[in-house]
Image: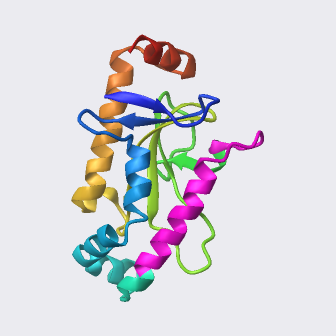
């Protein structure tokens, strides 16, 4: 496992899993803009799309996904000086109210005009404003444990968090030192 710097200010990183040519953020953004991949995904998960979001039109789901993907990319890759990733990421557990070391976080678009966004980015929070993207998913169910593709994202977050704990990383400084030694 390697880590790619996404923003030059060292505030955003993405995991490059062993055997992958691209980091996970590139892979996710490419998937979510690929109509062929999206047709396969929504066809396989149509019952979740219908029951949770009340959407039966695959073309609408694909269009909404591509549109949300573009907006999420702009938010995540914002390089303006006042960009604040803490406005985008929230604790993975909806009821968590205090900070924890290497907390598991999620990012999603808020206040969508049509329906809630089903796109999620998952990350480990190194410290306020500093994140490592571990994966992402189209979440069509209430709980991540309900589907294998979202359960896999939980496992990836735990895998990355365990690695960081194992090597003694607890903040952005420790992470920068660890990455420079790779």
Q: 62 or 50: which is nearer to us?
A: 62
Q: Which colour style is shown?
A: rainbow
Residue 117, magenta (yes or no) = no
Please tell me whether residue 56 is drawn above or below residue 142 in the rendered image. below
Where does the magenta region start and end? 61-85
Task: State which quadrant residue 104 falls in.
Answer: top left
Residue 90: image location, x then y, percent: 55, 48
Name the outermost residue toward the front: 21
The residue at 27%/52% (across/down) is 151
On the image, the x and y values in percent for residue 153 come to 32, 48
In the depicted structure, whether residue 144 falls above or below residue 166:
below
- Name the residue at 56% across, 58% down: 72
Report x, y in % for residue 62. 41, 76
Q: Is residue 9 above or below residue 81?
A: above
Q: Nearer the viewer, residue 147 or 120?
A: 120
- In the image: residue 125, left or right of residue 74: left
Looking at the image, is 38 positioned above or below residue 108?
below
Q: Which quarter of the figure is the C terminus placed in?
A: top left
* Residue 11 pos. (x, y %): 60, 32
State yes or no: residue 69 in magenta.
Answer: yes
Which quadrant would the N terminus be assigned to in this image?
Answer: top left
Q: Does residue 149 appear to the left or right of 10 in the view shown?
A: left
Q: Nearer the viewer, residue 141 or 95?
A: 141
Task: Judge from the rendering whether residue 6 lies leftward or rightward of residue 142; answer left or right.
Answer: right
Could you tell me which residue is drawn at 62 percent across and 31 percent down?
A: 8
User: What main secondary structure does the magenta stretch of the protein show?
Assistant: helix
């Amino acid at each position: 496992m390697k880590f790619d710097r996404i923003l030059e200010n060292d505030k955003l990183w993405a995991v490059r899993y062993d055997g992958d040519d691209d980091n996970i953020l590139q892979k996710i953004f490419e998937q979510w803009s690929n109509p062929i991949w999206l047709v396969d995904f929504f066809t396989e998960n149509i019952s979740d799309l219908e029951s949770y979001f009340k959407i039966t039109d695959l073309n609408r789901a694909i269009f909404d996904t591509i549109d949300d993907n573009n907006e999420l990319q702009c938010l995540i890759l914002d390089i303006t000086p006042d960009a604040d990733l803490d406005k985008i990421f929230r604790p993975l557990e909806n009821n968590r109210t205090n900070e924890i070391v290497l907390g598991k976080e999620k990012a999603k678009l808020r206040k969508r005009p049509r329906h809630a966004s089903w796109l999620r980015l998952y990350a480990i929070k190194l410290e306020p404003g500093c994140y490592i993207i571990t994966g992402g998913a189209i979440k069509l169910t209430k709980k991540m444990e309900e589907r294998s593709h979202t359960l896999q994202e939980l496992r990836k977050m735990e895998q990355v968090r365990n690695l960081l704990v194992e090597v003694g990383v607890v903040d952005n400084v420790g992470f920068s030192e660890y990455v420079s030694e790779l």
